[in-house]
Image: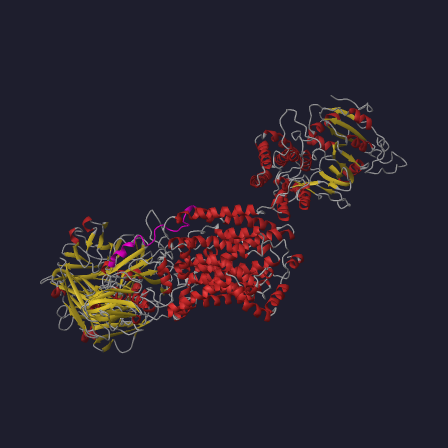
Amino acid sequence: MSPSHASSTHGLRRWPILVAVAVVLLGAGVWDHHQGAPAVPGAPADLTSAVPPTGAESSSWYCAGGSGTTGGSANAQIQIADAGAQPVSGTVTVVNQLGATASGTFSVPAGQVGVVDPAAIEPGTWVAASLVADGGAVAVSQSVSGATGWAQAPCASATATSWYFASGSTAAGTDAYLSLFNPTTTTAVADLTFLTDAGPTQPAPFQGLVIGPGQLVVEDLGTYVQAQQDVATTVEVRSGRLVAAQLEVATGTAQGLSLQPGSPSPSDHWAFPATTDVSGATTTFAITNPTSSPEPVTVRVELPSGPVAPFTQTLAPDSAWQLTTSGASRIPVGVAYALQVTSSGGPGVVVARSVSWPTALASPRSGSVAGVPAADEAANGVRTWLLPPPGTASSPAVAGAAPLDVGLVNTGTTDVTVRVSSLNGAVATALAGDEAVLLHPGQAFDVGYSALQATAADTLEVSSSGPLAVMEDLVPSGMAGVVSQAGMPVLP
Amino acid sequence: MTQRGPGAPDAPSTRRRRARRTAAPSGADPFFPVAQPAEDPDAGTAGAPAVVAVLVTRDPGPWLEECLAALGAQDYEELSVLVLVAGGSEDPTPRVAAVLPEAYVRRLDDATSFAAAADEVTSMVEGAAFLLFCHDDCAPAPDAVHVLVEESFRSNAGVVGPKMVRWEDPSVLLHVGMSADKTGAVVERVQEGEVDHGQHDAVRDVFFIPGGFTLVRADLFAELGGFDPAIVAMGEDLDLCWRAQVAGARVVVAPEAVVRHLEALAGGARPVAPPADGSELPSLQGLQRRHELRSVLVCYSLASLLWVLPFAAVLALGELVVALAGRDRARARVLVGAWGWNLGHPRRWRAARGRVRAQRRVKDREVRALQVRGSARLTVFFSRLTHQGLDVAQGRSPAEGDGEQRQVDEGPLLTGSVGLAFSEDADFDELDDLGHRSGRDRFGRRRRRPILGTSTARLVVWLVAVFVLLVGTRGLFGNTLPLVGQFARLPDWSGTWHQFFTGWQATGVGTTAPATPAFAVLGALGTVFLGGMGLTQKVLVLGCVPFGAWGLTRMLRPLASPRARLAAGVAYLGLPLAYNAIAQARWDALVAFAALPWIVGRLARLSALPPFGDVERPPGWRGHPLGQVLVLGVIEAVAVAFAPAVAPAVVLTGLGLVLGSALVGQWRGALRALAGAIGGTVVALVLLAPWVVGTLAAGHQAVGIFGLTTAPWSAPTWSALVRFAVGPTGSSPLGWLLVVAALLPLLIARQSRLAWAARLWSVALLSWLAAWASARGWAAPFSPSVDVLLAPAAVAVAASIGLGVAAFERDLSGYRFGWRQAAGAAAVVLGLAGLLPVVAQAGNSRWGLVANGYAQPLGFLSASTTQGPFRVLWLGDPRALPLGGWSIEPGLAYGTSENGVPDATSTWAPAGSGPASTLADAVELATSGRTSHLGRLLVPASVRYVVVVESLAPTISGIQSSTPYPAPGDLLPALLAQADLRQVPGSGSGFELFANTAYVPQRAGRAAGPVTEGSPGTVSWPTPADTAGWFPEMPGPRNQLSYDGNVGAGTFYAAYAPAGDWSLAVAGRHLAEHPAYGWAAQYTTVAGPAELSFSGSPLVPLGTALEVLAWLVVAAALAGRRWWLDWWWQPLARRRSSGPSAAVATVAAEGDPSPSPSEVQP
């Protein structure tokens, strides 16, 4: 500015305001552009078997997939584990496939386990139950048993608009049933998609299935998806919300029962804390990509001695990868290993493990279990898991039902300390020693049968300082992994 | 036909001539005194190269003799004179013979132009070293030829020219050589009327020698092929010299040689000779422009032409636009004609171009060294634009039909609006000066008033603005405003007053907090409109926009001219803020938009900063600062009643004024503005006392009255805030233009305009920053409405634009020509273009406000009252909710309405939610997965429906879309997971509706026993048993604050808070009230007729009545006769003598000088 200009402003300074304007306008603009707009917070990751925490006003559970008639192939029994310090009570509403509904009540002392027989409330070829508890810290699981064996799986704590089942079979000697239970007051309309070796298929009879409020619909998948060794199923709900569960009844040499609660969404990280390949048995991990984007998948195996070379494959949209680890030379027979599946392409994949042992020894000899959605649990900040027992001492799921082992694997990236305890009344008994177990990232730990032997009817509680995947094997079964149940995460 | 002159029997070849100093027919030259004769008359130029003066004439005027005499008086011995008569009706031979008998005269009937005639010399003259081309209106000094020839040798110049002076006054310079820019536009080297003090008397290279008296080396002339015969007039000199430069010859001006030049052709004393083919010639201006372009096309190399020609075309296009805008058809025709003449007939110049290519010795780069940089015309235009104003730069031609004026127009002055500015006619400056002195120019024409200089012109602009407003608003006149945002239906007139005076509001689950005084304002206005509350609402909504613009022009009154205020007002109307407020259905933003200009104006007056210190103040107490604070407080109170965030916005404005003053170095007076802002706010709060007390009683929730924390994920970006693009209008990049235009006063303003521009920009910056922080929730829960916080920025931007115009008018001329002038012009263009987004949005007819609100898809809810009265729980972003409410978390608020969609009684929720907070607790339980029975938890509040709003209005495919405001992602899944909430089929896009299957009516009875009592202050959730067995009782409509009907024996439940203020009487006997869930009431009843009525404290009605009384007193004081107040005020004022006034005067004296009377144009 020339001197004449300076004088013409009568002592006013022009540059400070110019600097201020430039700094604020440009600085804020650059900062704002750099920061970007915050994303709309999405819904929390779906944990359909999550236990509401202590202090919850109420909690609901939905159990489907079982039968409720004498001589049924998979008669259901519901276990209600109260992990809180207060007794819990509630109502049970049972509906059968014909729409008949009846209700009952339940009451479980603090730290104890209660058992409900749905058939005693409302029998039916197929039954489903809604349980409403008047508090939190209640874990509900369902065991099914029949002539071919038994299985146990967590019930669902929430409905969802989609359900994914990574494995299934309609091959000869295997029947697969899909239970669609609508516990809400809104009619739901669902479409089913099946993914087989021939690609995805949507049979017309399985489109537009109408499930009224409180109703149960059970579909025999083999009716229209016939003789398929590997069938992955997707349930898409057009309107309303549902609970879905898949029951497999194997009647051949590898007879057994499998009860799989569906996964409400794909995930990019799944874990199986403990798997043991047995000579002569077949262990297969079904990794399904139900999304529309390719998914590069990495399967990491952690042996007690350390990791082995991972398995990798890119899954095209609507495709599945059947990884038979029992045939992989890099995994020794008879050694328990942890397995984690990660994907990086998009929404993720869904994963299940199937074990079969065709040799005619103890029954059941085959079973399937969905993986632990490690990413979803980590997203919800889960640090506690509950494992309801297979019934009570007086009402076991099947005779001799008991935990065989509890597998744990650190799914996070930092060390965690883990405590495992059994709950019986007000008493919590530490298992695996009094000291907390330290697990490095990827490291697995197994609580053996000897430690669990005395707590067969107790609820097991696993607490950790970080993300963890929890799964237990149950007996009686032909081998470890036939009857397995994932730990039920407790919401913080 | 050729003939010899009577005294010149021989051809004018190289014959030696004697000096003719004594041959002047009229004795001594009165302008150029004759030097003393040398002792040896032949000693001077003996042996000098021969020079042939080629004098071209046609119907010469009386000046011919003087010219011939001057040639005859040259002291150069070897000078011969060849007179070429280029047609015409007169034979000048006798006149030549009389003065210069030795001159050779030749008549050329075929060559009518100067160039064509002069070119004949090549076939007529042999042996001459130099050719001196002369006009017949030039009178050289006796030594002129001598000097030119000498300089030609000294400088080795091919073309040499003299210093030309005025014919009638040789002390005034005409030309000392000339230059041109790259497009051939001629640039004069001397100023108009510049007196010759020898300041240009250095020999120097010039781009060309103006025609009249040009010495050209004969061989160069022959090589160049002479003048371009296609140039009939105006431009042959430029063309010849340019080609000479290209051929490597120097063109030099030798100022020692002086020539008087009449410029008869350019001066209009003689017409241009018609072409031999009889075609019609354009005006001189047209000839000049087309020949300039021809020279460009001929003289440039192809490489240069590739970029110069587009450049010239762009300039011409711009000039054409300016000419058309200024209705200068002559100028437009000239431009079109010049380009058409050249480009339409390329053969005319292609051959000449080929010759120049063959003669080229010098690259264009070297030739351009003598050209002026940039565009000469553009520079002149902007210079005159900024120094003398747009009207001068774009002066208009006299009206056609005026014979005298037309004659002037058709003359040589190259007049016409842009023509003056764009031409080389320096008379233009004189025109301006004369115009200023006399009001008329030298031709007697009335000097034009400045653009928008008349009130009529400004009125036209205002009418245009109003027209645009009406066009943009036309869709809102006929229909009811949709239920979106804050545009809920007003209750009827009595209901509006009742809402204000009653001691209980139904908001939430009921509260005794006083209602906002906005209802009193609405009721009063509704009274004016004879109870038509719909009309009242529309007048308020739509009237805010022009009211704000009016306030802005009033605000700038002491600071800017009417034209600048008009610009500010139009700019304020051109900002998207108000229209986005309409589109977003924001009462608060509209009220802030209307009120802030008035408030800022009041703050400016309170500051007494120049020039506001000189503003005449009202007499008496109202002129005192305290009186002004009271006025400010009244304005602010009205605004705050509708938009509480105005209060922090006013304080923010005060801070901005202080900050701006500090930045600019003049902060003292600004503290008064801040004090005024605080004082006005205090006054406003006092005037709103009952409502303020009720707000403060809400404790930590009180800040929620200013606005609820919105979702950061749908917050406007910084750039959107700066552009005020917080809605559908202004999101295009054009939205930046008004803001950029507002920067102008910071660049060019001086004195008080600079100071106020700095203050206003500080206000704008603070406003934007505050809005940014609020939008992002950085100060949560203190999150004043973003739209309201932007209002001060809008005022500042628009006012800055007005100041920019004022600075353009007042300050720009004080700077040397440079970037500031360009910035000023750019700001004008940007400001105009910045209005386009709003003008374009006017086509929407509703400013983007949707036609269908939530009343349409959710209207059926009201039919559900047959099953008992109920509440609707609304959840969503605060900006999307069609009612007032309270915050649950950033981006999620809640509110309730009774028996269907809300009306305006729910628009202004009290700050404290009271027991309604249990609704928020219940929703939080659901979203955190801690309940699967949200419906049951909502039972105490009798919530029958839950509406999740995810956009400002329902989205109807193919009909309307609306601004999305997504709710937090966990909300809908949580509601869908509830076992007792049923999603209602047919929920529209943009919202989700859930029915509570566990609902209990607001007034319900059952035979069973009481429900959970709970305790006040703690949350008590109902058990499943609590929700069973209820049926509606006393379902009738509300009769003010009581309900009646029959009740049965058992338990009666009333979902109204506070429970203690309601009573139930059955058969005339009041029943004992028992708490329910800690806040509601339940009664153990017997069957019989019953009445449930409100029996709260009368304090609230009493307080509001006192409030109304206070308003009436203040209104009477401000608007009524003042004598009844002055009886006490004036003695008090006298006792205080001149204290405050003296302070004001002192500060005013410390500030910068007050503007001159012409600067302040009220």
Asked whether residue B691 is in view, the answer is: no
- Residue at point 42%, 52% (across, down): B728
Name the residue furthest left.
Answer: A70
Quadrant of res B392? top right
The quarter of the rendered structure image containing the C terminus of chain B is: bottom right
The answer to whether residue A83 is left or right of residue B699 is left
Name the residue furthest top.
Answer: B1
User: Residue B1145, image x and y in percent?
Assistant: 62, 65
The magenta region covers B843-865
Magenta residue check for B855? yes
- Above or below: residue B242 compared with residue B717: above
User: Residue A305, image x and y in percent?
Assistant: 29, 68
- Above or below: residue A409 compared with residue B345: below
The quarter of the rendered structure image containing the N terminus of chain B is: top right
Magenta stretch prevailing secondary structure: loop
- Above or below: residue B705 compared with residue B4: below
User: Residue A86, image x and y in percent?
Assistant: 23, 75
The answer to whether residue A335 is left or right of residue B1097 is left
The front one of A297 and A428 is A428
